[in-house]
Amino acid sequence: MAPIQNVKGMRDHLPADMMLRQYIVNTLTRISENHGFEPLQTPIIEYAETLEGKLGDDEKLIYRFEDHGGRRLALRYDQTVPLARVTAQYAGQLSFPWRRYAYGPSYRGERPARGRYREFYQFDLDIVGSSSPLADAEIIAILCEALAALGFPGFVTLLNHRQIIGGIARVSGLSEEAAGGVYRAIDKFDKIGPDGVRTELLKSGITPAAADHILELVQIDGTPDEVLHALSQQLANDERATVAIANLRAVLAGLTAMGVPPDQYRIAPRLARGLSYYTGVVFEAITPHWPEGSLLGGGRYDDLIGLFAGRQIPTVGLAFGIDRLHDVMLELNLGPRPRTTALAFVTLFSVDQVADSLALAAELRAAGINTVIALEPGNIGKQFKEADRRGVRFALVLGPDELARGEVVVKDLQRGEQRSLPRAAAISLLAEALNEGK
RNA sequence: GUGCCUGUAGCUCAAUGGCAGAGCGCCUGACUGUGGAUCAGGAAGUUGUGGGUUCGAGCCCCAUCAGGCACCCCA
């Protein structure tokens, strides 16, 4: 017999966790749709070939298997490659620019750790088919709006551009090949510090002079305008970096015009981000309360979608890691913590009142009040106890006395108060409590 | 994938190589029209799993599974 346990890195999500997870997803969905994003769902299984050749070194983490028909299949690694496939496959049915969101699990055969699992849920947000800096700005604006709505204190979105890092590497005299080592090294800056980065750079064969120059540029700090001004002077001889800086300025103007509070973002020349397919703006959100790493990140990838479509389709997007958001929110005690989905518990006084109680429950539900019923009549004390244990706030009693008066007893188990009210008044009392709770 | 740490009741954790325990939770009752508090009682375990050493293993050794931390990488 199989052991009674989860497969490594795969988790169950019991009700207490699910209610917070759904709150997170509902919040993200609401904000996405508020910006006109449309939902998309794709299968968890893809042809292995679809995923291969898109991810670089990370391909070894793909879960691969063969089905009964001998097809080479894989569990999706992210929701970006499936988006690329869908975009190519249904190009005629989609209209661009296309704003789409997608929520679901992806799979990576990594060593699990806190905030990191082999099955993990992401909420993806992409604008397909636009190279406008306003598209970048909108994605970043949603990111800030979402983290603010979820209650993250002191989060900051770090912004950079791939061609700024590239320019830093080039003006330091490095070849394109050496630039890869630069990305990896400077991305660790906040973890290992300037000396650590210098050591890493030297290890990858970069001269001390170049390493020092890189470190100097990468540590430029200040307001977005100050940082971009300094970079534009330092990188004035690099055409691509100059274009990138102009692009970032346009993104910043968009953020300002969209009303994103200026303390929620910052230009960080050291931000690299691992995924190899990014081509333009990159960003990630950090919070001082989660030193383990970024909360989430994203960027512009103008070439990936086109791999399937056969033409360039510029795209910018981001992925919220639901598991990580959930872990951090638990740790920081953020978000609502309902214990159950029900607001009302209808007791069964005795066998004679069962039908009336069930009718009352139906009335409550029709009024939009989540209602759970007792399943065994009698012993009201035990039924109150069950309601209380479940975390249901209101217990309703319909005994012979109440029925005779056309009333119902409503007991607020949270406050310990109880009143006997006409049925209509009881229902509107609960409806009121429901609205307060929202 | 490499290294290190951990695994005992539902949860948090005790137990010199010598009878497996506590707190919380859960169930029953005191209380047949009222939950939480209190009191009394109860259920609960092949000590992650499989081997080994030993008169005797929760404890020591090996393997394996799972979790955590550091690399690596990323959400």
Image: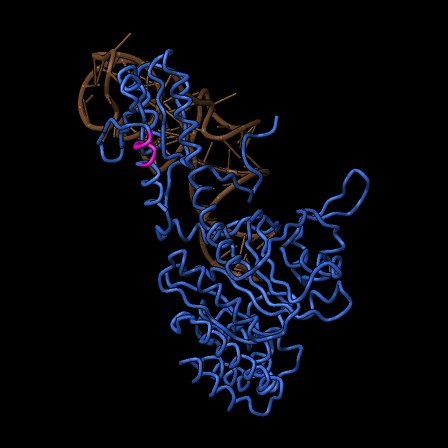
Which image quadrant for residue B40? top left
Give the quarter of the figure containing the N terminus of chain A: top right
- Residue A266 as seen in the image, left or right of residue A235: left
Q: Nearer the viewer, residue A334 or A356?
A: A356
Dominant SS of magenta comes to: helix
Q: Relative to residue A204, is residue A24 depicted above or below? A: above
- Compared with A198, A140 (above or below) is above
Chain letter, brown: B
Image: magenta residue range = A424-428
Measuring from the top left, give residue A218's x and y in whole percent: 49, 80
Above/below status of A244 relative to B11: below
Identified at 63% across, 53% down, the residue is A40
Is residue A301 rendered to the left or right of residue A408? right
Q: Residue at x 40, y 74 (%)?
A: A262
Residue A204 image offset from top left, x and y in percent: 59, 75
Asked where in the image residue A89 lies, by quadrant, the reply is bottom right
Q: Quadrant of residue A363?
A: top left
Depth order, front residue of A295/A142: A142
Give the chain letter for blue.
A
Decide whether residue A175 is among the magenta residues.
Answer: no
Image location of residue A99, percent across then percent down: 60, 62
Pinpoint residue A276: horizontal percent, then vertical percent.
63, 67
Residue placed most toward the observer, B2 or A144: A144
